[in-house]
Amino acid sequence: MTRHGRQTLLLMLLSGLVIASCAASTGTESTESTETEVASPSPAAIQPDSATAQANQTTPQQPSGYTLTPVVEGLEHPWGIAWLPDGDLLITERPGRLRIVRDGTLDPTPISGVPSVLVDGQAGLLDIALHPQFEQNRLVYLTYASGDSQSNRTEVARAEFDGTSLQNLEVIFRVNRQKYGTQHFGSRLVWLPDGTLLVSIGDGGNPPVELDGDLIRKQAQNLSSYLGKVVRINDDGTIPNDNPFVSTADAAPAVWSYGHRNIQGMTYDPLQNRVWVSEHGARGGDELNLVEAGKNYGWPLVSHSREYSTGQPVAPTQSQPGMVDPKIVWPMTVAPSGLTVYTGDVFPDWRGNVFAGGLRTGNVHRIQVNANGNATEVDTIAINQRVRDIRQGPDGLLYVLTDENDGQLLRIDPRP
């Protein structure tokens, strides 16, 4: 490990101790962008009821056969990444900047035309995705927090990229409820093969944050609200006419799945034609879910999480009929963010595996899945920094964004 890596690891460990101490005294999650970085109860205390999920809790091993190669440095809390057709990269920074990497070099001048962004706590400029027909229409999509600390929401905007700036920006989706506080915005973007766009939306925050006189996290079960949901929209923000609740009275028509806490990893698996998400639990209980249209994933009525303030279970049960169980439950906090399915040929043994970033662990978690959707974590790749995103590049290699003040883009290369 390099000196930088050792220093970063030491800082992470010290930071975890400090945050755990603060959580014990205040009963709240850190308002920094350090999702769920609090001490977790022992694994035995929150073992899942689900036999499948429980069977899939293994002790991951450190794989061999790869090296980590720095590609770009000097990024401030990078969040999302997208490859342009010419091989250049667009990278979002949470403080509200869109950066471009040209010929392997980070341009010091940010891309202009980015929308006004709330930057506070977990709020900021979040994910980025290119339109599937980008080469024809030059459309770039961004998710971000808008408003102020007392009244805010997640939005999706699109704009035309001319090589140096965003032009003709328009907001195509807004969460339909405003909230206060700066927690749980989501938010990932995933294109489906039919040209529709999935957007993950957080539940709004931890207790004591409220909406309509009750804990805001209960909005995840309210079909009239977009909080705690995955939504599905057309590329212009209109609603697909085959969305699962489009004809349900009082339901918000863009809702695609519900009962989510805070999804910060979402990916489409083209090999199996399915969608995976990784979402934060509260105190322990992070989840990997196989998400389908119209399904309820339980939060906060069922959960493997515990309250920050008391350590007691968030929900009275971890599973119940009519709600979908997670494929993996991480009893100890991973703080998952960034998710991809490997489809390349450079690492043939990894083909079809799901890779999940860990903010708390500083690892990339490799997960084997089968055609039935069963999942088992088999090993981890130590990054020794907060992992914000992981994506497969056009070259068939995996790339990792680290969520640091001096963040990096790292490439996972096969060992010579």
Image (spheres, rainbow, N blue to C red):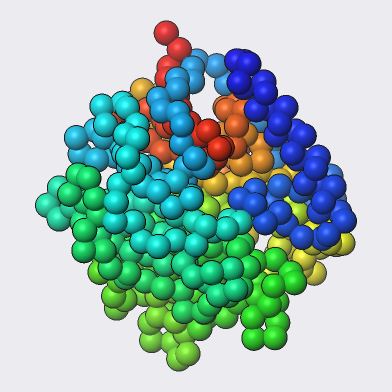
How many numbered markers are drawn?
Answer: 0
* Residue closest to the eye, 255 or 32: 32
Q: Please name the residue shown 69% across and 72% down the image.
A: 209
Q: On the rendered image, what quadrant is the C terminus found in?
A: top left
Residue reaching furthest to the left: 136
Q: Please name the residue shown 53% across and 77% down the image.
A: 178
Q: Position of residue 377 (x, y in %)?
A: 60, 37
Would residue 207 appear left or right of 366 to someone viewing this image?
Answer: right
Q: Please name the residue shown 20% across and 39% down the image.
A: 85
Q: Is residue 386 above or below residue 289?
A: above
* Residue closest to the eye, 58 or 195: 195
Q: On the rendered image, what quadrant is the N terminus found in?
A: top right
Q: Is residue 254 above or below residue 191?
A: below
Residue 136 appears in the picture as rendered: yes
Q: Position of residue 389 (x, y in %)?
A: 48, 41
Residue 289 appears in the picture as rendered: no
Q: Position of residue 348 (x, y in %)?
A: 40, 24
- Quadrant assignment, res 140: bottom left
Would residue 186 appear left or right of 155 to someone viewing this image?
Answer: right
Q: Please name the residue shown 65% across and 75% down the image.
A: 216
Would residue 371 appear left or right of 29 to someone viewing this image?
Answer: left
Residue reaching furthest to the front: 109
Q: Position of residue 76 (x, y in %)?
A: 49, 40
Residue reaching furthest to the top: 416
Q: Is residue 78 above or below residue 396?
A: below
